Structures are given as structure tokens and as C-alpha cells.
Image: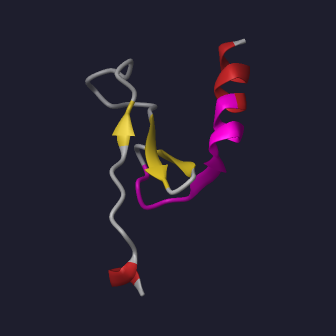
Amino acid sequence: MEAMTPRLTWRKSSYSSSQGDECVELADLNGGIGVRDSKDPHGPKLVMDADEFAALVAALKR
């Protein structure tokens, strides 16, 4: 089934350091956002819809 899984394009924030330490990566999903730890790309991932992601970002900014 892995072969049928579409490839996601993961990206880091432009604010991330060039060393790539302690970063999260984001991927656009159909109707949502994927979030993963850049140091563990094969590990667990979070999936949330756009409204949940916006609320998370707002809470982190506060």
C-alpha cells in the first residue's frame, strides 16, 4: 500500500537555523496540514485541519 501513498513535500520555516536542529516541518494535505519533527522524519506525524492549525499558531504566538 505504501506505493499508493502520494509523496508529500515537507518544508521548514524560513526562520529555522541552517543547522536544522529543533525544527518542525509542515506539509500541505488535502484540506489540512501535516506536522512532523525534522529530526525524526519517519516518526509520528500530526494531522490537523486548517482551522486547528491556525488556532495552534495563534496560541504559540501568545
- Queried whether the magenta region covers residue 30, the answer comes back as no
Quadrant location, the N terminus: bottom left
What is the residue that sits farthest to the bottom in this orientation?
1
Q: Where is residue 17 in the image (x, y as percent from the top left)?
A: 33, 20
Report the span colored magenta.
Answer: 40-54
What is the residue that sits farthest to the top in this orientation?
62
> What is the count of numbered marks?
0
**Quarter of the view holding residue 50:** top right
* Colour mapping: secondary structure
Please say if 14 is above or below 21. above
Name the residue at 33% across, 82% down.
3
Please say if 53 is above or below 43. above
Name the residue at 44% across, 33% down.
23
Q: Where is residue 47 in the image (x, y as percent from the top left)?
A: 61, 53
Name the residue at 40% across, 75% down.
5
Pick the front one: 16 or 30: 30
Pick the front one: 22 or 10: 10
Name the residue at 39% across, 27% down.
13
Please say if 32 is above or below 57. below
Q: Position of residue 18 (x, y in %)?
A: 26, 23
Pick the front one: 9 or 18: 9
- Queried whether the magenta region covers residue 47, the answer comes back as yes
Determine whether, in the image, residue 7 is placed left or right of residue 51.
left
What is the residue that sits farthest to the left in this orientation?
18
Quadrant location, the C terminus: top right
